[in-house]
Image: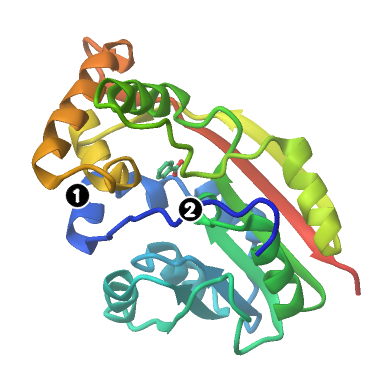
Amino acid sequence: MGGEERPAAGQVWSPAAYAANAAFVPALGEGVLGLLAARPGERVLDLGCGDGVLTARIAAAGARVRGLEPDPAMAAAARARGLEVVLADAHDAIAGGPYDAVFSNAALHWMRDPPRVLTRVFAALAPGGRLVAEQGGFGNVAAVVTALNAARAAAGRAALSPWDFPSPALARRRLETAGFAVETMELFPRPTPLPTGMAGWLGTFAAPFLADLPEGRRPALLSAAEGLLGALRDPEAGWIADYVRLRFRARRAA
Ligand code: BEZ
């Protein structure tokens, strides 16, 4: 593993909970899909395809797309859409290449060792192939992370940083180190309404902050974090999370 390895997230996925609490994740994927601009017949890998909502969009564009997903339940949900999905971890060698493009939405920030994953992606691409991705960028959900860590401190637990939200400069350096030429790199705030409120979001995504607590103490920690986050609750629009996205396209030289 590389020098930037981080602990495993301890996240457990439920396709039903994801659809209820986080359907906005693929729904807000238009921009990165546009940057991919998949063409008919292209070989595309969707890295961290989740339940396959965006993978199906790439297939609909006529590309020969395959999903890569480490979580069995999410992979099964994607297969139920008729998609081809490899159950695998992106830190390992990527099978089935070479690909014309590797696409990824909202998955790279979960990686324990991003430089290693980039090396795997580079090796899986054909010469001239592209990596098109969107992930949390520097400052993403900063208020939420701070509140979760304040609640952890009150519970006698150390602060955690389970997600990788790089600055454009760090992301570029990692890509170039892996051999890519960076073509576009954009960091932008995207305040995101939460359809099931902060409680729904925390229940879906905050598992890494709970793993070292007895189960009986977890609900109180989430309530404490939610209680600290009132500034993200608009009296009319409801809960709006402080998302910041990093979107980029990088190419393996021809
Ligand atoms: C995100 O998509 O930005 C995100 C997802 C889960 C946890 C944290 C951030």
- Identity of the residue furthest to the right in this view: 254
- Please give the name of the residue rendered at 39% of the width and 48% of the height, measured from the top-left corner: 25
Res 187 → quadrant: top right
Left or right of 188 in this view: 157: left
CB at disc 2 and ligand 1 closer than 8 Å? no
Residue 142 appears left or right of 11: right
Q: Nearer the viewer, residue 170 or 213?
A: 213
Question: Residue 39 in the image: x percent, y percent?
Answer: 65, 73
**Residue 181 visible:** no
Q: Secondary structure at mark 2?
A: loop
User: Residue 219, position in %: x, y?
Assistant: 13, 35
Which numbered tag is attached to residue 7? 2
Residue projecting furthest to the bottom = 96
Q: Residues within 10 Å of mark 2 (few under 14, many from 20)?
A: few
- Residue at image location 53% in from the left, 70% down from the top: 46
View quadrant of ligand 1: top left
Residue type of the residue flagged with mark 2? Pro
- Disc number placed over residue 112 in the picture, else none: none
Query: Is there a contact, CB below 8 Å, between mark 2 and mark 1?
Result: no
Q: Position of residue 250 (x, y in %)?
A: 77, 57
Along the line of sight, the residue nearer the viewer: 82 or 228: 228
Q: Secondary structure at mark 1?
A: helix
The residue positioned 32% from the left and 10% from the top of the image is 231
> Tag count in the figure?
2
Q: Amino acid at mark 1?
A: Ala
Find disc 1 in the rendering and name its residue.
Answer: 20
Tell me the quarter of the image containing the C terminus: bottom right
Residue 85 lies, in percent from the top left, at 43, 82
Can I make out residue 24 in this image?
A: yes
Q: CA distance from mark 2 to mark 1?
A: 27 Å
In this rendering, the answer to whether 75 lies above or below 201 is below
